[in-house]
């Protein structure tokens, strides 16, 4: 039996088991959903999604300022300029995690579809970067227990959403006051460099420093 069929069978079996156990036990043993990391350290977490716009100015900022950043990338967005992202991982402090294959609302898909999107993206990212992603950012932040089941079957340790979105969608959004443990969401859009500078400025104003996400999730027992 192929890997996808095995995963689908496991998800189906787990779904049946959850139904029998009842809603009170529905989340037991599943990877958690994290919007903010509990920590006493004065740190904030910068994350960037998708990967469609490969802005050299944004890359320059990340590399020159040595910003620890987590990239939740779509495989197709990586494929037409892989070197842009491998430079960030090899010369900078970037790590690459899972954002699915085609950015669907995972809650609308059946088990086969969830597997194709999550496991499929993980395999393609591992092929490019030599490391299987352990974090998943579900598109639109859409999560339910079935999504968490599928994520677990694909080796995901935590599903990461966000505390504040600093992306400029048409008009520049108000800049929130950041707190320790906040997860900042950005996107690879034409405004990324400006959005990144705004996020870094907000972190500095709050007395916080960008930090690598995965080690802090592990330290908090969340991954």
Image (cartoon, rainbow, N blue to C red):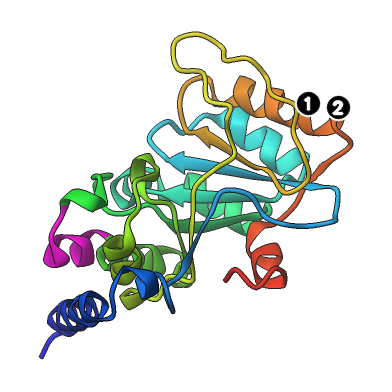
Q: Could you tell me which quadrant the C terminus lies in?
A: bottom right
Is residue 81 toward the left or the right of residue 157 in the image? left
| Residues drawn in magenta | 109-117
Magenta-span inclusion, residue 115: yes
- Nearer to me, 88 or 25: 25
Please state the horizontal and vertical placement of residue 76, each as a whole percent of the image: 28, 47
Residue 201 image label: 1
Is residue 200 toward the left or the right of residue 115 in the image? right
Residue drawn where x is 60% and y is 31% of the image: 58
Density class for disc 2 (Cα within 10 Å; few <14, some 14-19, many ≥20) is few
Spot the residue most to the bottom. Answer: 1
Badge 2 element: helix
The picture quadrant where one finds residue 77 is top left
Question: Can you tell which of label 1 and label 2 is closer to the viewer?
Answer: 2
Badge 1 element: helix
Magenta-span inclusion, residue 156: no
Q: Are marks 1 and 2 in contact (CB under 8 Å)?
A: yes
Number of dots carrying numbers: 2
Please state the horizontal and vertical placement of residue 43, each as a whole percent of the image: 79, 48
Q: Could you tell me which quadrant the N terminus lies in?
A: bottom left
Rendered view: 59 above or below 30: above
Is residue 97 toward the left or the right of residue 117 in the image? right
Please state the horizontal and vertical placement of residue 107, each as a whole percent of the image: 24, 51
Q: State how far apart marks 1 and 2 are (Cα).
A: 6 Å
Residue 59 image label: none
The picture quadrant where one finds residue 219 is bottom right
Residue drawn where x is 69% and y is 29% of the image: 199
Q: Which residue is mark 2?
A: 205
Q: Could you tell me what secondary structure mostly forms the magenta stretch?
A: helix
Density class for disc 1 (Cα within 10 Å; few <14, some 14-19, many ≥20) is some
Please state the horizontal and vertical placement of residue 68, each as a whole percent of the image: 70, 50
């Amino acid at each position: 039996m192929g890997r996808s069929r095995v995963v689908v069978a496991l998800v189906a079996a787990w779904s049946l088991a959850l139904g029998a156990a009842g809603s009170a036990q529905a989340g037991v043993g599943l990877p958690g959903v994290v919007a903010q990391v509990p920590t006493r350290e004065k740190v904030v977490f910068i994350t960037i999604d998708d990967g469609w716009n490969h802005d050299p100015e944004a890359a320059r900022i990340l590399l020159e300022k040595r910003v620890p950043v987590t990239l939740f990338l779509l495989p197709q967005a990586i494929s037409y300029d892989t070197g842009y992202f491998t430079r960030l991982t090899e010369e900078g402090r970037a790590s690459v995690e899972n954002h699915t294959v085609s950015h669907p609302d995972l809650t609308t898909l059946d088990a086969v579809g969830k597997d194709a999107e999550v496991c499929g993206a993980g395999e393609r990212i591992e092929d490019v970067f030599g490391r299987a992603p352990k974090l998943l950012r579900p598109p639109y932040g859409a999560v339910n227990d079935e999504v968490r089941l599928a994520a677990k079957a694909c080796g995901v340790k935590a599903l990461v959403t966000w505390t504040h979105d600093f992306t400029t969608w048409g008009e520049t959004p108000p800049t929130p006051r950041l707190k320790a443990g906040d997860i900042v969401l950005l996107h690879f859009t034409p405004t990324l460099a400006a959005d990144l500078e705004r996020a870094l400025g907000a972190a500095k104003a709050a007395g916080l420093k960008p930090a690598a996400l995965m080690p802090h999730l592990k330290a908090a027992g969340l991954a």
